[in-house]
Image (cartoon, rainbow, N blue to C red):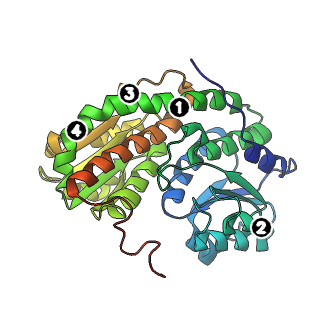
Amino acid sequence: MSNRIALDEGVAAAIEGLGGERPGHVFFVACGGSFSIMHPAKFMLDQHSSLASDLYNAAEFTSRAPRTLDARSLVILCSMTGTTKETTAAAEFARSRGARTIGMTVEAGSPLARACDHVVAFEAPYTTGVPIDAANSNYARIYQIVTELVRLFDGEDLTDRLLASLGSLQEAIDRADRSFAPLFDDYASRFASQDVVYTVASGASYGAAYSFAICVLMEMQWINSQAIHANEFFHGPFEVLDEERCFILLKGMDSTRALEERADTFLHRFGKQENILVLDAKTLDLEGIDPLFAGNLVPLIFFDTLWRFAHRIADLRQHEMLTARRYMKKIEY
């Protein structure tokens, strides 16, 4: 049964702060793992709204200085701790152009929060180790921002259906953990011994593949990786495929699933099944999640369950997930 949650107060205040003025352009701006949630957010906005939008790495946003950034723009930024210097600088740059800004962060008093017009708080278990309800995650918050934009400027009220689905999301993740556990048990020992593991996805799921590649495999396990778009796979990257190469393929439930299915067929044609970990959303119990939002919420299920897979790999490699970092948050760079 769906357990409807309330619209987040920070989201409600941020949307009210727009004063009913339609943005001329929406910019999604962040770095790293926070940047990864911008992909599915833009995907959702593209499918439900006529609002024009782009997503940028924060440092490139300020360096490129798009001419479409002006007083009619809305810039949505995210940094988990709110201390990412490039993202804070991007917020300050956007405001210097007169744009309205919404900053998403765990820390309400952070530099990013202070640099933005409105702050939307979320919870994150990855660095704190404290479990959360997925309804309070960064995905959940940014999706609420998107559906509220759609309600206000496109006249379609999707928020109630989204909130109902978010109320059932954590239970769906818990069921997915149990469903994927045997698969993870089977693949963990082989993947733990690899120097290279690629991730493949498209559409709303591409951000999850991107985050797992750069923030988990590379940052936390020092395993070389690359997130490959399921269709870009056929425009060069598939030449690395052989029976020894390891891939993680995310098969979602949005309109781009056919691209992932094509990649799946090719991977199994020239690769070896024991080295191709496929997470297929169609095998999951998504009770309580509105089919309209299944494609958008599945990426969070993928990422949360893959995090558990990463911990299994870390144990086998005798490599700490966070404390073994050499550079990140340990030196000036």
Name the N-terminal-most of marks 4 and 1. 1
Name the N-terminal-most of marks 2 and 1. 2
Q: Identify which residue is drawn at 71% across, 74% down.
A: 93
Q: Residues within 10 Å of mark 3 (few under 14, many from 20)?
A: few
Q: Position of residue 286 (x, y in %)?
A: 47, 25
Q: Position of residue 246 (x, y in %)?
A: 21, 51
**Camera-nearest residue between 114 and 131:** 131
Name the N-terminal-most of marks 3 and 2. 2
Which tag is nearer the camera, tag 1 or tag 3?
1
Which tag is nearer the camera, tag 2 or tag 1?
1
Q: Which residue is disc 2 drawn over? A: 70
Helix, strand or loop at label 4? It is helix
Helix, strand or loop at label 2? It is loop
Residue 149, picture quadrant: top right
Tell me the amino acid under the disc marked 3. Answer: Lys
Q: Which residue in the rendered view is the most extreme toward the top?
A: 1
Helix, strand or loop at label 3? It is helix
Image disc number at residue 282: 3
**Camera-nearest residue between 80 and 299:** 80
CB contact under 8 Å: marks 3 and 2: no
Q: Is residue 158 above or below residue 10?
A: above
Q: Which residue is disc 1 drawn over? A: 169
Q: Is residue 228 above or below residue 67?
A: above
